[in-house]
Image (cartoon, grey):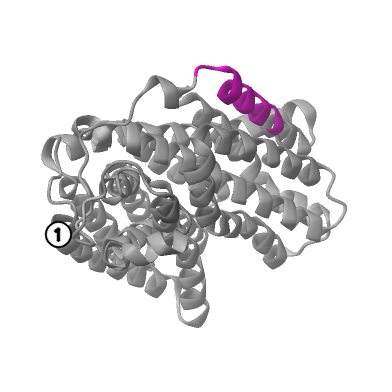
Amino acid sequence: MIYGPTVLFALGEGAVIPLIPIIAAELGADVATAALVASALVVGQLCGNIPAGWAVARIGERLTMAIAGTISLVGIVALAFAPVLGVLAASVFLIGFCAAAFGLARHSFMTTRVPLSFRARALSLLGGTFRLGMFIGPFVAAALLALVGEERAAVWFFGGCLVACVLLVMLGPDPEKQFAPADERVPAEDTGEAVTGSIPTAERAGVFRTMWQFRRVLSRLGLAAASLSALRSARQVVLPLWGVSIGLDAQTIALVVGISGAIDFALFYASGQVMDRFGRLWAALPAMLLMGLGFIALAFTHDLDSAAMWFAMFAAVLGVGNGLSSGILLTLGADVAPRADPAPFLGSWRTLTDAGGAVSPLLVSGIAAASSLALATGVVGGLGLIGAVLFAVYVPRFVPHQRG
C-alpha cells in the first residue's frame, strides 16, 4: 500500500514518456515543437507542486492520490484521442500536474510516518520504486509496439496502471490510519519556533505563508537541492547528445546510457543506508563531487582519439554519482519540513527541485547553441561543484541531527 501505487504510476508514465514526441510528430510537429510538447510534462509538474501541497494539507494523502489518479485518466483519454497538437500538449501538462500531486502526497505521508532512524532508507526505497517503474516502462512500451504496432497501446497501458492504482489506494487498507505519525522529529532551524501539536486553521490557510515562514531554508538548502536536480536532468540530456556529437550510432549510445542507468538504479538502497548510518552529507557530497568532476572531465575528451571509451567511462561515473544521491532530495525535504503539517512546505521544496531540473536542459541547449556542447558540459560540472559547497555549508546548519 505504500510503495505499490508509486510503482504502478511510474510504470505507466515510463511507458508513455518516450512516445510523446512520436505522437506529436504524427500530428505534424517538427523536432522543436515535439520537444516543446514533451516538456509540458515537466511544466505541469512544476505548476502542480504548490496546489498539491494545499490539497494534501486539507484532504489528506489518500484522497489526493485517488483524485490525481482519476484526473490523470482524463489526460490519458485526451492523449489517446488528441486531434491536434494543442490538445496533446494540454493532456501531457495535465498528466504532469497530477504526477506532482501523486508524488507529493506519498512524500508527505512518509515524512510524517517514518521514524528518523530509518527515514533515508524508506525514502530511498520510495525513490527506487519510482526509478524501477521509469526503468521498466520503456521496455513495456517497446514490447507493446512490437505486439500491436500502435503507439497508443502504451497510452492505454498507462490508463490500466492508473485504474489499478486508484483501486489500490481506495479499496486497500489506509496507511494513514494504520501508521500513526512518528514521534521522532527534527524541526527545521528556520524560524526559531518549534511547531508542535495540531496546526491551527489559520496556519493551513496559506501555502504562501509557509513559504515565507521557511524562506531561509528554501533559499539556501533548497538552492543546493535544485543544483542536484539540475545535474540529474543535465545527465539525461548531455549523454545522448555527447554520443551523437562524437559519432556513435544509436545502438551504442542506448547501450552506454542504459548501463549508466542500471548502475544508478542498483545503488538506490545503498544511498539510504549511507544517509541513515553516517549522515546526509556522506551521500550528498560524494554524489555532487562525482557528477561535477565527471562532467568537467568529460568536457575535455570530445576530440580525443579514444573519445568513445572516455564517454562510456564517465557515463558510468555519472551513474554512480546519481545513484549515491538517490532519495537525498526526498530525505532532506522531510528533514526540514514542519513536523505536523509538512505538505505545504514540501510543495515549495519540490517546486524548487523541479525548477532546477527544468532549467538545466535549457541551459545546456543555450550554451551548446552559442558555443559548444563541451563548454555546456563543463558549465554543468561547475554547477555541480558549487552545489557541493552549498550542501557542505547548509546541511549541517539546517539538518544538525543527520542520523537516527
Where does residue 4 sit, x and y in percent of width and height? Answer: 49, 24
Where does residue 143 sit, x and y in percent of width and height? Answer: 66, 28
Q: Quadrant of the C terminus?
A: top left
The answer to whether 264 is drawn above or below residue 182 in the figure is below
Q: Main secondary structure of the magenta part?
A: helix
Question: Which residue was labeled with disc 1?
Answer: 397
- Residue 272 lies left or right of residue 350; in this view the side is left
Task: Check if residue 163 falls in the magenta segment.
Answer: yes
Q: Which amino acid does label 1 sit on?
A: Arg
Task: Check if residue 275 falls in the magenta segment.
Answer: no
- Residue 44 lies left or right of residue 348; in this view the side is right
Q: Which residue is drawn at 68% across and 27% down?
A: 163
- Residue 33 lies left or right of residue 55; in this view the side is right
- Residue 102 lies left or right of residue 347; in this view the side is right
The answer to whether 395 is drawn above or below residue 72 in the figure is below
Q: Which residue is drawn at 85% across and 44% down?
A: 81
Binning the other alpha carbons within 10 Å of mark 1 as few (below 14), some (14 to 19) or many (20 upward) gives some
Q: Give the range drawn in magenta.
A: 159-173
Can residue 177 be seen in the rendering of this structure?
yes
- Mark 1: which secondary structure? helix
In-front residue for pair 166/150: 166
Locate residue 73: give its quadrant.
Answer: top right
Report how many numbered discs are placed on residues in the image: 1
Residue placed farthest to the bottom in the image?
370
Where does residue 31 sit, x and y in percent of width and height? Answer: 70, 63
Where does residue 228 sit, x and y in percent of width and height? Answer: 33, 57
In-front residue for pair 330/309: 330
Q: Which residue is drawn at 33% across and 64% down?
A: 213
Can residue 263 be seen in the rendering of this structure?
no
